[in-house]
Every structure is written in C-alpha cells, then in structure tokens.
Image (spheres, rainbow, N blue to C red):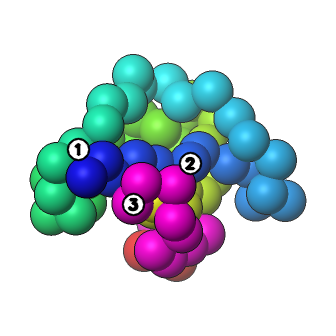
Amino acid sequence: MAWTWRFEKSDGTETVPAVEPEEFTTQGDAESWVGEVWKELLEGGTEQVTLFEDGTKIYGPMPLTAEDA
C-alpha cells in the first residue's frame, strides 16, 4: 500500500510542493511527514493537501493555513 499527498492551491488546482514528497507505507507516516513540513509547503505555495491510499481519496482537502490548523 502507498499513501501519497496531493498538493493544491485553495481553489483546488494542483501545485508543485516546496518539499519533495515520497510514498509512505502507513497513514501515520504520511500524516507525520506533512505535520513536520506544512510550514515549508505553505511558504512554497501549497495551501491545502489531500491524502490518498493507492489512488483512493482518504480525506481532504485539508488547509495548511495557521488559522485553519
């Protein structure tokens, strides 16, 4: 199983993340990673993220802005 993030602007258009993502083997690893780098992602132009497991949407979009976090 592979857990991946989709990186987006607030209008849903896909963006290139400021931090190189990877495929994660667990949901917890994916969530921990985004928790560690969310500020860098936001500064790089990503405003929200969506989590997928093997291409199936699990949840999101989840805003990265501090007032929504």
For label 3, the residue is 53
Mark 2 secondary-structure assignment: strand
CA neighbours of label 3 inside 10 A, class few (<14), some (14 to 19), many (20+)? some
Disc 1 marks a residue whose amino acid type is Phe
Quarter of the image for the C terminus: give it. Answer: bottom left
Span highlighted in magenta in the image:
53-67
Disc 2 marks a residue whose amino acid type is Arg
| Sequence-first tag of 3 and 1 | 1
8 relative position to 51: left or right = right
- Which disc is residue 24 wearing? 1
Q: Is residue 35 magenta?
A: no
Residue positioned 37% across, 30% down in the render: 21
Q: Main secondary structure of the magenta part?
A: strand
Mark 1 secondary-structure assignment: loop
- What x and y, as percent, mark residue 46? 61, 43
Q: Quadrant of residue 44?
A: top right
For label 2, the residue is 6
Is residue 56 visible in this depiction of the protein? Answer: yes
Residues at marks 3 and 2 touching, judged by CB atoms closer than 8 Å: no
- Number of on-image labels: 3
Q: Looking at the image, which is closer to me, 62 or 3? A: 3
| Sequence-first tag of 3 and 2 | 2
- Which disc is residue 39 wearing? none
Q: Looking at the image, which is closer to me, 47 or 29? A: 29
Is residue 64 visible in this depiction of the protein? Answer: no
